[in-house]
Amino acid sequence: MVLDRSGLPTLADVPEPEGPGALVSIRACGLCGSDLEKLTPEHAGAVLGHEVVAETVDGRRVALVHHRPCGECERCRAGHESTCDSFRAATIRPGGFAERALTDAWVALPEEVDDARATAVEPLACVLRGAERVPRGRVLVVGHGFVGRLFSSVLAARGDEVFAVDADPARTGRAPDGTVDAAVICARGGVETALEAVAPGGTIVLFADARGIPAQPLYRRELTVIGARSATPAHMEQAAALLTELDLPEPTVLPLERFAEGLELFRRRAILKVVFTP
């Protein structure tokens, strides 16, 4: 699935990927909200997809690592691996919406987890890293789509009292009865909701591009705002091990030929998650 000159996804034949890395056969790839942001002329020629389950040449089923930090620089040692210079390099080439790809790293998958469910390893790994920055206690998840559901599941599993709201009433969970200790913003437009809910001295974790955060309430109420983006190989390992223990939403599975249909369903919020198979 290649982006054309207009940035629209088009099914096309492309050369077998060549170069460094291991060649794998892709079994399934999930569509991420960040993929939608790249459907622009600027990314013409790109093959998107990074929530990938693949098969190695020796028959092992694996989840591909999307980005890989160096693990040694000052930023990595401080726990900010996603800001590492090495983190920018693509580790899945050309991308997951294809039949085959080159990869630099992967994690093994439990045999009892099917391909579609296993595509959740990468987003779950991102959530696990983000959850480390969420103080324990009463937590509000703002934006309760697929990633919001992952946050709710992870936070509840560690013992937090979890609340969830969404612009779509059908996706809203239990609203908070009073203030919360922390809020996780998983969708654009969630800033005002989070600010209203968090108690003075509380924490807001940005897991989405929450624009327009006003300084006044942060200053007056001494709130802490923390960003969390992407995952590390270590979090990928943790996510793979947790797949069988968490209550995760079931995805809609479609062949790659029906990409436009799945994209439209996802955009209309008619489904929580769509996974494509080549």
Image (cartoon, rainbow, N blue to C red):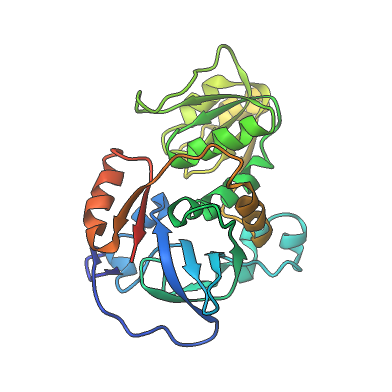
Tell me what residue is drawn at x 26 percent, y 64 percent.
7
Tell me what residue is drawn at x 44 percent, y 41 percent.
146
Q: Position of residue 148 (x, y in %)?
A: 49, 37
Residue 211 visible to an observer of this rendering:
no
Residue 213 visible to an observer of this rendering:
yes
Q: Outermost residue, top direction?
A: 177
Quadrant location, the N terminus: bottom left
Numbered circles on residues, count: 0
Tell me what residue is drawn at x 59 percent, y 56 percent.
110
Quadrant in which residue 201 is drawn: top right
Q: Position of residue 40 (x, y in %)?
A: 29, 61
Q: Position of residue 247 (x, y in %)?
A: 54, 36
Which of the two residues, 108 or 213, is positioned nearer the viewer here? Answer: 108
Which of the two residues, 44 or 232, is positioned nearer the viewer here? Answer: 232
Is 128 placed above or below 198 here? below
Which of the two residues, 212 or 22, is positioned nearer the viewer here? Answer: 22
Is 106 placed above or below 177 here? below
Quadrant location, the C terminus: bottom left
Quadrant in which residue 12 is drawn: bottom left
Q: Position of residue 50 (x, y in %)?
A: 46, 62
> Viewed as shown, does residue 185 lie left or right of 166?
right
Is 244 placed above or below 193 here? below
Tell me what residue is drawn at x 70 percent, y 32 percent.
135
Q: Outermost residue, bottom direction?
A: 19
Is 74 placed above or below 102 here? above
> Viewed as shown, does residue 64 lie left or right of 133?
left
Which of the two residues, 156 or 254, is positioned nearer the viewer here? Answer: 254
